[in-house]
Image (spheres, grey):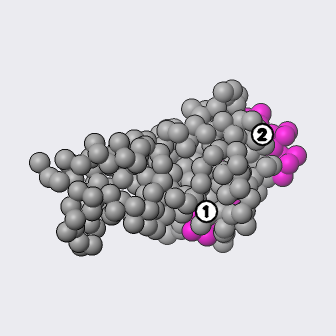
């Protein structure tokens, strides 16, 4: 059994799940067991702990012991069909998708009608909209507050809008979907389109996500900065959710 394995229980007991700590603190902990431990061996220990799924990076040089899951959402059959229609017509564009129904698992009260959000290169937003419109889908492009109130919340709709720079996405099979970090930022940012998920429901969603899934705050805050809300969402996460970005 490796040293890493032998000390896993000690590491958990010392740092606890969900508490952030620096690389320096972890190195000092190891040195209490191995006074001659060098930096190179220590880096391999970190690598091994990450590979086991025990250690996660919060930001550079800051870690957390994590028993939470990675988020792998399921796309509906209809969304996959829509994705393929767009991809077949525009095979070289950047695109990602997410469904508001994914939020149901994190809420006290489920929203009656969910909708799907496709984000594509800004140069093809109009073209993608027209392709789906030709297919008779209930599609909207950069919807207004009136659209949301009168049409989108009443039916299963498709939203087409521009992709924000460095939006965090992941691949689920052959489909690119939004990461949870992106969804949380979009939820906080978009008070019009995502109006049904604001207030107490948003706080519930944030808490459920942070309690049950791996969230990289560096990724979240980088994307939030690109949306112009980094300071606001950081304050919200610290004050309302109780999650800090430092050790």
Asked if one can make out residue 163 in the rendered structure from this viewpoint, the answer is no
Along the line of sight, the residue nearer the viewer: 65 or 123: 65
Q: Residue at x 55, y 49 (%)?
A: 180
Q: Position of residue 11 (x, y in %)?
A: 32, 48
Q: Residue furthest left?
A: 1
1 or 2: tag closer to the N-terminus? 2
Asked if one can make out residue 105 in the rendered structure from this viewpoint, the answer is yes
Along the line of sight, the residue nearer the viewer: 6 or 84: 6
Q: Residue at x 85, y 48 (%)?
A: 145
Q: Quadrant of residue 121?
A: bottom right
Mark 2: give few (<14), some (14-19) or many (20+) Cα within 10 Å: few
| Element assignment for label 2 | loop
Q: Residue at x 43, y 52 (%)?
A: 64
Q: Residue at x 52, y 59 (%)?
A: 247
Q: Is residue 208 above or below residue 226?
A: above
Q: Quadrant of residue 246?
A: bottom right
Along the line of sight, the residue nearer the viewer: 37 or 5: 37
Mark carried by residue 221: 1
Q: Position of residue 110 (x, y in %)?
A: 67, 28
| Element assignment for label 1 | helix
Q: CA distance from mark 1 to mark 2?
A: 21 Å
Is 109 on the left or on the right of 70, as rendered? right
Q: Position of residue 16 (x, y in %)?
A: 41, 44
Q: Position of residue 230 (x, y in %)?
A: 69, 63
Mark carried by residue 199: 2
Task: Count the numbered circles shown.
Answer: 2
Is 46 on the left or on the right of 127, as rendered? left
Q: Is residue 187 above or below residue 91?
A: above
Q: The magenta stretch spans which residues? A: 144-168
């Amino acid at each position: 059994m490796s040293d890493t394995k032998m000390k896993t229980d000690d590491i958990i007991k010392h740092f606890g799940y969900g508490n952030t700590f620096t690389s320096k603190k972890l190195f000092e902990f190891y040195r209490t067991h191995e006074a001659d431990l060098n930096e190179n061996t220590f880096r391999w220990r970190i690598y091994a702990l990450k590979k086991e799924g025990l250690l996660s990076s919060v930001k550079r040089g800051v870690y957390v012991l994590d028993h939470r899951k990675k988020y792998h959402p399921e796309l509906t059959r209809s969304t996959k069909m829509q994705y393929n229609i767009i991809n077949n017509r525009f095979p070289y564009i950047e695109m990602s998708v997410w469904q508001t129904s994914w939020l149901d698992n994190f809420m006290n009260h489920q929203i009656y009608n969910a909708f799907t959000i496709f984000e594509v290169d800004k140069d093809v937003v109009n073209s993608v909209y027209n392709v789906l419109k030709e297919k008779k889908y209930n599609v909207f492009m950069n919807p207004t507050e009136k659209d949301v109130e009168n049409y989108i919340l009443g039916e299963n709709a498709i939203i087409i809008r521009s992709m924000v720079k460095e939006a965090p996405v992941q691949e689920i099979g052959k489909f690119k979907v939004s990461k949870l970090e992106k969804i949380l930022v979009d939820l906080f940012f978009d008070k019009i389109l995502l109006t049904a998920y604001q207030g107490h429901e948003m706080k519930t969603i944030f808490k459920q996500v942070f309690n049950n899934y791996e969230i990289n705050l560096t990724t979240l805050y980088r994307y939030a900065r690109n949306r112009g809300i980094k300071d606001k969402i950081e304050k919200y996460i610290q004050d309302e959710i109780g999650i800090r970005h430092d050790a």
